[in-house]
Amino acid sequence: MSAAPKTTATDKKFDGFTDDERAAMKEHAKELKAAARRDTRAGKAAEKAAEAERDVLAKIAEMEDGDRVLAERLHEIVRAAAPALQPKLWYGMPSYTKDGKVLCFFQSAQKFKTRYATFGFNDVATLDDGTMWPTTFALTELTADNEARISALVKQAAG
């Protein structure tokens, strides 16, 4: 009598990306197409920026309560701290750009089934502090102190 073949985690075939990651990439492709359509249409930059902000606000409105409350408040903080930053969707998440590059972004806990939402900064943010500094922050709620810190970081990042 032969023993049944053993299976291990290494026997499973790696498909590359998770379903959530694939969905985020598809959202990003839609965002790029929408931005390209905006760029080809005749119109003022202010109209295009307003349309991008409406897209961000619509995406925030779709979030579950906890993430939505955080994202709405973060949107207000970012817009007040650095009005020159332009809101846009980035992989289905609210983000804020400087010179066309994503400077900071919100990532909902619901979207990637994580324990907490995050607010992060990309490398174009001027947050350099020595040889190591934080670029992503876990968020469970926004206190007055947290809001003040985020506001100061956004101002610094936007330079």
Image (cartoon, rainbow, N blue to C red):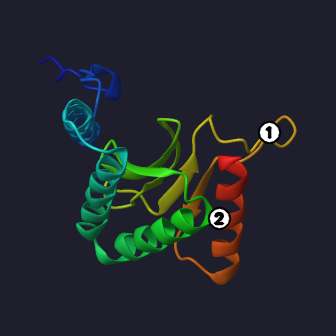
The N terminus - image quarter: top left
Q: Position of residue 93 (x, y in %)?
A: 36, 51
Q: Image point 83% across, 43% down: which residue?
A: 129
Rendered position, 77 above or below 45? below
In the foreground, 45 or 95: 45
Amino acid type of the residue tagged 2 in the rendering: Ile
Q: Residues within 10 Å of mark 2 (few under 14, many from 20)?
A: some
Q: What is the quadrant of residue 147 in the picture? A: bottom right
The mark lying in front, picked from 2 and 1, is 2
Q: What is the quadrant of residue 61 in the picture? A: bottom left
Rendered position, 54 above or below 104? below
- Which residue is tagged 2? 150
In the foreground, 20 or 87: 87
Q: Estimate the spatial distance between the alpha carbons at disc 2 and disc 1, rounded to whole Å.
A: 18 Å
Asked whether, in this view, residue 151 is left or right of residue 127, the answer is left
Q: Position of residue 2 (x, y in %)?
A: 15, 17
- Which residue is tagged 1? 132
In the foreground, 45 or 31: 45
Q: Position of residue 55 (x, y in %)?
A: 26, 56
